[in-house]
Amino acid sequence: MRKGLNIVLVLTLASLVALAPAYTLVSMAATYPTTVSGNVIKIGMPISLSGKFATEGHQALCGVIATIMWINDHGGVNVNGKTYKLQLIYYDDASSANNEPSIVQKLITQDHVNFLLAPYSSGLTSAAAPIAEQYHVIMLSHGGASNAIFQKGYHYLVQILSPASEYFTGALEIIKQYIPDAKIAFIYANDKFASSVVQYAEQKAKQMGLDVVYSKAYEVGTSDFSTFISAAKAAGANVLLGGGHFADGKALVKQAHDLGWHLKFIAILVAPAEPAFYQQLDDIANGVAYPSQWEPGVKYSPQLAKQMGLEWFGPTVQEWISYFNKAQSEVSICKGIGTPSYHAAEAGAAVLFLVKAIESAGTLDNAKVRQAMNNIDIMTFFGRLKIDPKTGLQIGHKMVVAQWQNGKRVVVWPPEVAQAKPLIAPPNWWPSTATTSTASMSSTSASATTSSTTSTSSVTSSTTTKKTSKAVLWGSIIVIIIVIIVGVWLAVRK
């Protein structure tokens, strides 16, 4: 009998081991620095290191690491005369909102972090915020721009980046000044962030007297944008605003170009801010603009802070970029990222704002640190930081518009901080003559067809993969049940 039962256990365990890869588990915790001597302030962070937000997530993580490096190298945090070093504890949330509650709860109850940084994106921040609020732990939002998040009455959620309502303001001002015959198309992701951005942008466009001829949201995960592009072209649109995140924004731009859409101005959310956008699209990227929270060429400085009557806090722009490069050379997960995007800067600035609040409060008590945040009005390498005391919404920071020109990202708006004028009707988006040859049109059509076929194939492959995974999962479960039944039957016979 015992021998039979042992067989059952062995076979069952073997089956479970075989089945294990079918499950997706939350990653193990990682820390930076790995060890800290003396007093330590622990900051917890769920962040996307895999999945659809991995590009932005890696930038954000390394921006935080760069700032922690600078803080720890410059005396740490002074808390009522006692010095503390910072340590980051983070988990890969796999770009899934479903993982946020468990990760945040684990950071608070098991890792015993003192404060939290939100995950990247509005959707993931929305999923994480209720848990932080439940435990009365401050969570600094560096990647959740949706205004709606800050209309839910959270007290412990504080925003660092400019809200979604401000994202396309600069682009609309450019259009108003430079393109009198503008006909705008909005093609954007149907998620919390992009939908919120476009909602406010459409309202402002109408207030400014601009002509919006097409507006349509695409579902998250869309890879074929030909239907949206064709409809917008048919409506006479010569300006494109939209996108959502990196993968979809890049695909939208490429397909718009491949389908021969001759645009006078293009501004896309998130994607063009990443160095990988130009690396992957090359000349197509030239002329594509984007609303940016920060650019390496911004001119924030202690001198500007003094002129504005503000306190300067933290490293200068060049010092911070130097530490970002240091992180790339010393921290394996940051290697090869390249130039910091605004996703890195806004996350790094969140750490500075937190440190300033801790030192102002003279304590690690979350309620008192949150109260101190209401009175902070500082200038950092990221720009001005000041929140609305009632909602935690960011009201001090101002956005810029950047554009790819000749393979470089340059600030083109507002004029007082611009490095160059906006490029209107970029030549790489327009034919060299007014008439397009039949051969050229055939080539474009073939390219579009290939793109559409590839996208359809990709979707079909993805669907097939999911079905196969489910079949493997259920097949494994059935095998386990059969093994148990046979094992028990053998045991009983013995």
Image: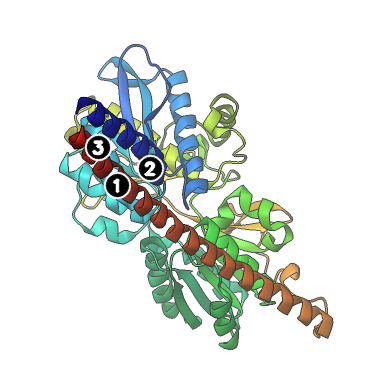
The residue that mark 1 highlights is 482
User: In this view of the protein, can residue 26 be seen by the observer?
Assistant: no
Nearer to us of marks 2 and 1 is: 1
- Residue 490's label in the rendered image is 3
Which residue does the image show at 33% across and 35% down from the upper left? 11
Q: Report whether 134 appears left or right of 114.
A: left
**Circle 1: element type:** helix
Q: Is residue 318 above or below residue 202?
A: above
Instruction: Specify the amino acid type for callout 2.
Output: Leu
Name the one closer to the observer, 162 or 329. Answer: 329
The outermost residue toward the top is 38
Are the two marked residues, 1 and 3, in contact with CB atoms closer than 8 angstroms?
A: no
**Circle 3: element type:** helix
- Please tell me in which quadrant of the rendered image residue 299 appears: top right
Which residue does the image show at 24% across and 44% down from the upper left? 485
Tell which circle, 2 or 1, labels the residue nearer the N-terminal end: 2
Nearer to us of marks 3 and 2 is: 3
* Distance between the alpha carbons at the discs numbered 1 and 3: 12 Å
Are the two marked residues, 2 and 1, in contact with CB atoms closer than 8 angstroms?
A: no
Give the percent coordinates (x, y) of residue 176: 55, 75
Instruction: Specify the amino acid type for callout 1.
Output: Ile
The residue that mark 2 highlights is 19
Q: Is residue 396 above or below residue 326?
A: below
Give the percent coordinates (x, y) of residue 61: 46, 37
Give the percent coordinates (x, y) of residue 389: 23, 48
Name the one closer to the observer, 153 or 302. Answer: 153
User: In this view of the protein, can residue 349 be seen by the observer?
Assistant: yes
Q: Report whether 87 appears left or right of 325.
A: left
* Distance between the alpha carbons at the discs numbered 3 and 2: 24 Å
